Image (cartoon, helix red, strand yellow):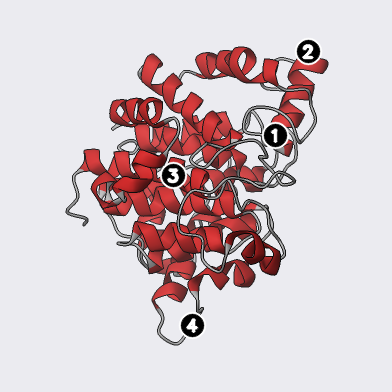
Amino acid sequence: MNAVTPSDRKAGALLGAFIGDALALGPHWYYDLQEQQRDYGSWIDGFTDPKADRYHAGLQAGDLSQAGRILLMTAASLRDAQGYDEKDFCRRMDEELFPQLDGTPAQGPGGYTSQSIREAWRRRVEQGRPWGETAGHADTTEAIERSLAIAICYSGDFSALAEHVASNAALTQADDTVLSMTVAYNAVLALLVEGHSMDESISAKLMERVKSGELPFHAVTRNNLQPPRPGDPDPPRAGRFASPDALLSPSYMAQAALDPDIIIEPAWKVSLVYGMPCAIYHQLPAAYYLSTRFQQDYEQAVLHAVNGGGQNLARAMLTGALVGAQVGRSGIPQRWIDGLRQREEILEVVDALS
């Protein structure tokens, strides 16, 4: 178990996500790595301004993207409501975010609006649908990027975590596989906040929560994935997710990171191994790999996430939360905390939630 205090781990996880988001703001979505290196050099090691003709143009080094701003809004809702209040979250979306959008990608706070948020805006604003009928089919990580604050808040109660994360994610994501992977990531994050390490045992610990009924995944195997015995009854469904595979994946990425016979050098090339695109099934394996390989080195973890190009903002945000939970706030470079342009507002919600 990690010797860092629980409060420090919670603060590290949330602050780690904000910093990962801001670090990738400038070099976001370069799929040509030679072009990225031409614009930002061979190694990005701090906050940078977005180029005038790129995503997030007009923002400055240390700013948050729209994903970071929605995370900040979610954390503020958790703080003010003293827990997850979906009505309060939806009210903030209606009053604070949606009036600033027009349904196009290259617009809105943060300079870019993701597909799932655009689709929710269309259903809610243009079509007048109620919340609960606003989800779209984007297979991306937007729901994780905001709901990780919920996981930090409910890290001691996996049943409540799964319920609230799934409910919040379903406001924008309609695909059950995306929802299951969103809950799984947040369950991993909660274990790290509890003090566990990101290693090959992480999935077995998650499956214990399935067996106890805390996590809503179906599983027919016995311990250590042993087959059911003749006469064993079909276990009752613990919840909405038919397969536990989203919980089993993290251990395989952890094993890959710890296996001396598996070499990814430099580590940023994990983006080429697992994929540079935005889809959740590219993003989570890379985040799990980097947060295992650099589990006690926040700086190296997020910088390799950023330098891998592609959807490096989500990769750095998710990696930053996982490693931040392991090293704690005290393990995050102070210069990056100081460099956040919304530093005071961010630290206020970090302190409240931790």
Who's the residue at 33% across and 35% down the image?
Answer: 157
Which dot marks residue 265? none
Circle 4 packing at 10 Å, graded few (<14), some (14-19), many (20+), is: few
Mark 4 vs mark 1, CA separation in Å: 36 Å
**Sequence-wise first label, 4 or 2:** 2
Which dot marks residue 113? 1
Dot 2 and dot 3 residues touching (CB under 8 Å): no
Badge 2 element: loop
Q: Which residue is mark 3?
A: 19
**Sequence-wise first label, 1 or 2:** 1
Mark 1 vs mark 2, CA separation in Å: 20 Å
Residue 248 seen = no
| Three-letter residue code for mark 1 | Thr
**Sequence-wise first label, 2 or 3:** 3
Question: Which one is closest to the eye, mark 1 or mark 2?
Answer: 1
**Sequence-wise first label, 3 or 1:** 3
